[in-house]
Amino acid sequence: MGTSGDAQGTDGNNAVSEISAWDCFFGDFNTSSDTNNGRLDNGVGFGVLNVRGGTYPDDQTVCRFIFND
C-alpha cells in the first residue's frame, strides 16, 4: 500500500503486488491454474483471480471490480 492508502506495485519484477476482497484478488500477476491459486509476476500485465477453495463457495463467488477515476 502506498502512503496515501492506495495500492501500488511494480509490474514484471517477480514480486506479486495485489489487493483482495473476500475470495477475489487483483494485482500485477499472471494467474496459474494449479490448485494452490499460484500467482507469478514474471511478465507485463494485470490479473484477476477468484481463488479456488477459499472462504466462500467456488460455484457462487463472482469477482467484480469497479474502478473510479
Image (cartoon, rainbow, N blue to C red):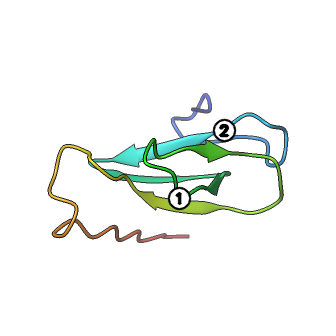
Classed neighbour count for the residue bearing mark 1: other residues with Cα under 10 Å, few (<14), some (14–19), many (≥20): few
Q: Which mark is residue 57?
A: none
* Residue 37 picture location, percent across and down: 47, 46
* Residue 62 picture location, percent across and down: 27, 70
Q: Secondary structure at mark 1?
A: loop
Residue situated furthest front in the rendering? 34
- Residue in view at x 41 percent, y 71 percent: 66
Q: Which residue is mark 1?
A: 33
- Residue in view at x 51 percent, y 35 percent: 5
- Foreground: 34 or 14? 34
* Residue 46 picture location, percent across and down: 66, 61
Which of pointers 1 and 2 lies earlier in the amino acid sequence? 2
* Residue 50 picture location, percent across and down: 38, 59
Q: Which residue is mark 2?
A: 16
Q: Secondary structure at mark 2?
A: loop
- Residue in view at x 35 percent, y 71 percent: 64
Give the distance between the C-alpha atoms of the residues marked 1 and 2, in whole angstroms: 16 Å
Callout 2 amino acid: Val
Q: Is residue 40 above or below residue 49?
A: above
- Foreground: 35 or 41? 35
Q: Comparing marks 1 and 2, which lies closer to the viewer?
A: 1
